[in-house]
Amino acid sequence: MNDLQKRSWAEISLPNLRHNYQQIRASLPEGCRFLGVVKADAYGHGALTVSRFLQEIGADYLAVSCLDEALELRRGGIHMPILILGHTPPEYTETLIENDITQTVSALAKAAQYSEAATALGKTLKIHIKLDTGMSRLGFLCAGNYFESGVSNLLRTLALPHLACEGIYTHFAVSDEPDPASEDYTRGQFKLFTDVIAAVEGKSGFRFSIRHCANSGAVVSYPEMALDMVRPGLLLYGYGDTSGKLDLRPCMRLVTTVSTIKIYEPGTYVSYGRRYVTEGKTRMGVLAIGYADGLPRLISNKCRFAVPGGFAAQRGTICMDMCMVDLTGLPQVDVGSEIELFGEENSLLQLSDAAQTIPYELLCAVSKRVPRVYIEIE
């Protein structure tokens, strides 16, 4: 990064990413595949760089949300298997096949459309079938009264020409929640998932090569649900290990700089809306980061940032391109000083709690104008 970029930046630690991969991998049963979720620009960490790194260190599969994300990886030299978790219009079937991209199929009607398109091309599309076991989003309906019809629709999907079904999966809704009701719900989802698979395989003689359901929460809390492959997302980037079982490290450190320092008298209003007023003589710093960089306006006056020698409370409404912090009693902080918004010194969870949201949202919100700087050595 050159000096002209030293406004705000995100440091991405590849050693921490390697550490997290190795810790998660070591927790898996022998032979279990590792799928790294790199959708949404690898949760803000840079999908292409992260995918290249995962490919290099031995991950088995990658997952993205949409075709554009998958093609970005293929154009960037990623040759390992890629699964699209979301919908791709059937008119792009040829693009999927030509780029060796695995497509999720979440309903019989969609499967029929992909089959028709692949048949017209005289080629075969590799797919993973998704079951809706309780997320109530994408997936074949199979719960309750839909069990028999769900099994029937899966059998009909498997019989369609020019579709090669490699895997089957589902997604847990509350595997990261520790309360008993959430545990019961997750175990119910898992049982339904395995029951459907058993029914389909029993009636057809077909065997799914890859059964996967363990997202980040399940990797930590339900290791018995690893099956043939796990899908860590946020966990891979150092968050979600609430028990500390895996000793993970955050991979992103969001940093900014102090651009101006002023001394204000008591009773001075700060920023838009006059939502903060100084109580005493205050040494106030202006930071070169705002909501256009991904710092949510919602956390105005509710958080603190790590500064040389301690922490500084954020003051006033966060602006588009900057925000203010109270540097009173912190004489070592000067213009140009580096400030950690979140990282190893200042937990991302402190900011997500202040915003009443989840860490995923804040990581994904770090905007494209914030340069990513990759740290390759510890």
Image (cartoon, grey):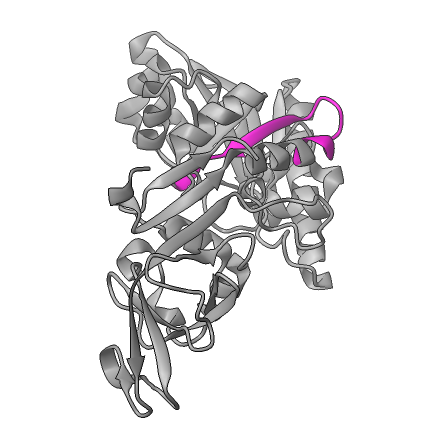
The answer to which image quadrant residue 40 occupies is top left
Q: How many marks?
A: 0
Task: Name the residue nearer the viewer: 130 or 254.
Answer: 254
Residue span colored magenta = 24-40
Q: Is residue 351 visible?
A: yes
Picture quarter with the C terminus: top right
**Which residue is located at x 28 percent, y 24 percent?**
92
Residue 342 appears at what percent x and percent y? Answer: 48, 56
182 to 377, vertically: above or below: below
Residue 109 appears at what percent x and percent y? Answer: 39, 32
Left or right: 232 as drawn, with respect to 136: right
Picture quarter with the N terminus: top left
Residue 137 appears at what percent x and percent y? Answer: 46, 48
Q: Is residue 106 visible?
A: no
Residue 325 appears at what percent x and percent y? Answer: 38, 71
140 to 332, vertically: above or below: above
293 to 165, vertically: above or below: below
Is residue 83 covered in magenta?
no
**Which residue is located at x 65 percent, y 19 percent?**
207
Residue with the most extreme front position: 331
